[in-house]
Image (cartoon, rainbow, N blue to C red):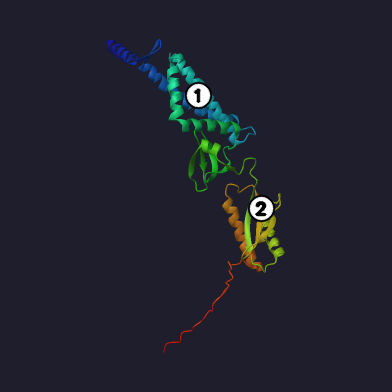
């Protein structure tokens, strides 16, 4: 027993070894371990709370997935902020002694951590204003894909190539963002089509509308439409306009299927898709043609 008491005494003496003075309190190794352990537990439990709110508590409601995840993320930030204050107080740290440290951190944020602070504030703006939410199809800075996660510092976008691209939140706030599904998933696509000048324009219109009606991914309300755009250098230019709600996240699939169907129907109906044409005018001089005599 004496050996056990001796070991426990040494361990206690080690944990109570003072590292530095903080106001009227002493910061020991035990205080450090206490802060690290409870902070790790706090972040772990707050993450579980976020998932529980988004996937269980609000799962039965009519709220969209982005709204549920935003609510869970905000709740997590609140719990972390309150939890850190409680941990510091229970560890015996007088928060008034941290004024100097807070001032130093403020200077650091002002100089070295500008981007981090900007991205964090932008993340809060995104969560509250919701210009972009989880599940949206967006285009920003040449990146196109579906939003899978909105974090405190960055937003994750998954492309159709199954590649996750991390975009800083400040970029979403500062730049123009194309959100294909901001209000709903109903999106209109425009498919340009060119035909030869000797084509029957009413037949072309009829064929394009038939293609749109026969495609199961094209909505019939709003109805498909055909526009005669103008007279090109080599072709009469039309535009097929269709609406879809199912292939918003895969626009290339819809455009490709419509182009295949248009080509097949044009070929069956004898509608010509022209090659580029150019007229050559010789303004002066003479053009001499010579034919080489066959070799014997």
Q: Residues within 10 Å of mark 1 (few under 14, many from 20)?
A: some
Q: Is residue 271 left or right of residue 169?
A: right
- Nearer to the camera, 189 or 245: 189
Q: Percent x, y for residue 161? A: 50, 48
Q: Percent x, y for residue 175? A: 55, 40
* Location of residue 22 (image quadrant): top left
Q: Please name the residue that numbered disc 2 is placed on.
A: 242
The residue shown at (38%, 19%) is 32
Q: Secondary structure at mark 1?
A: helix
Q: Is residue 215 left or right of residue 145?
A: right
Whole-number angstrom distance, CA of label 1 to CA of label 2: 48 Å
Q: Is residue 52 visible?
A: no
Is 167 situated above or below 97?
Answer: below
Query: Where residue 281 is drawn, which disc sits there?
Result: none
Q: Which quadrant: the N terminus?
A: top left
Q: Earlier in the sequence, mark 1 or mark 2?
A: 1
Q: Is residue 32 visible?
A: yes
Q: Percent x, y for residue 260? A: 60, 60
Is 115 situated above or below 177?
Answer: above
- Nearer to the camera, 218 or 108: 108
The residue shown at (66%, 54%) is 241
Query: Where residue 80 is drawn, which disc sits there?
Result: 1
Residue ranking furthest to the left: 3
- Nearer to the camera, 272 or 177: 177
The residue shown at (51%, 28%) is 48
Q: Looking at the image, do the residues carrying marks 1 and 2 touch, with CB atoms under 8 Å apart?
A: no
Q: Residues within 10 Å of mark 2 (few under 14, many from 20)?
A: many
């Amino acid at each position: 027993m004496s050996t056990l008491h001796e070991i426990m005494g040494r361990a206690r003496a080690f944990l109570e070894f003072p590292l530095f003075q903080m106001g009227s309190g002493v910061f020991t190794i035990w205080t450090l371990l206490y802060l690290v352990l409870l902070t790790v537990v706090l972040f772990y439990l707050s993450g579980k709370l976020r998932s529980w709110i988004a996937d269980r508590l609000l799962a039965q409601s009519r709220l969209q997935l982005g709204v549920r995840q935003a609510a869970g993320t905000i709740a997590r930030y609140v719990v972390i902020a309150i939890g850190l204050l409680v941990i510091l107080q229970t560890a015996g740290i007088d928060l008034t002694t941290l004024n100097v440290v807070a001032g130093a951190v403020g200077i650091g944020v002002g100089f070295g951590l500008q981007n981090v602070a900007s991205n964090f504030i932008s993340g809060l703006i995104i969560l509250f204003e919701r210009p972009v939410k989880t599940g949206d199809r967006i285009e920003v800075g040449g990146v196109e894909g579906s939003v899978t996660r909105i974090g405190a510092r960055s937003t994750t976008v998954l492309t159709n190539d199954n590649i996750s691209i991390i975009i800083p939140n400040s970029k979403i706030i500062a730049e123009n963002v194309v959100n294909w599904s901001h209000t709903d998933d109903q999106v209109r696509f425009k498919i340009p089509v060119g035909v030869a000048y000797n084509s029957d324009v009413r037949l072309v219109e009829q064929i394009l509308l038939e293609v749109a009606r026969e495609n199961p991914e094209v909505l019939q309300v709003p109805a498909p439409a055909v526009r005669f755009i103008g007279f090109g250098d080599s072709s009469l230019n039309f535009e097929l306009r269709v609406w879809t709600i199912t292939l918003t996240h895969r626009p290339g699939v819809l455009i490709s299927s419509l182009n295949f169907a248009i080509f097949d129907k044009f070929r069956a109906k004898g509608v010509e898709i022209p090659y580029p044409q150019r007229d050559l005018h010789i303004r002066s001089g003479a053009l001499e043609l010579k034919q080489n005599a066959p070799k014997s």
